Amino acid sequence: MKHLDIDETNIDLTVIINEIAANQSEVVITRQGLPVARIVPYTISNPSK
């Protein structure tokens, strides 16, 4: 899991989304060291019948 501080990093959302899609990993966005958001890969679940 990767952590990015929104105040210290020039965050490029496209780069983050591409990394998440390629690695099926998640990214935690922090502000002043505290987590404020988490970006996770989207998964499609098959409904049970």
Image (tube, helix red, strand yellow):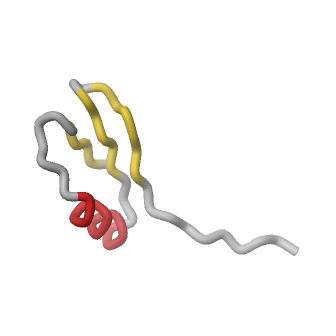
The number of discs equals 0
Question: With respect to residue 32, does 41 lie above or below?
Answer: below
Quarter of the image holding residue 19? bottom left
Question: With respect to residue 6, does 43 lie above or below?
Answer: below
Quarter of the image holding residue 8? top left
Residue at the image position 32 percent from the left and 73 percent from the top: 22
- Looking at the figure, which quarter contains the C terminus? bottom right
Residue 17: horizontal and vertical position, in percent? 32, 64
Residue at the image position 26 percent from the left and 48 percent from the top: 2
Question: With respect to residue 37, does 34 lie above or below?
Answer: above
Residue at the image position 55 percent from the left and 67 percent from the top: 43
Residue 23: horizontal and vertical position, in percent? 32, 68
* Left or right of 16 on screen, residue 48: right
Residue 24: horizontal and vertical position, in percent? 39, 65
| Residue closer to the observer: 20 or 31 | 31
| Residue closer to the observer: 14 or 23 | 14
Residue at the image position 71 percent from the left and 74 percent from the top: 46
* Left or right of 8 on screen, residue 41: right
Residue 45: horizontal and vertical position, in percent? 66, 69
Question: With respect to residue 5, does 21 lie above or below?
Answer: below
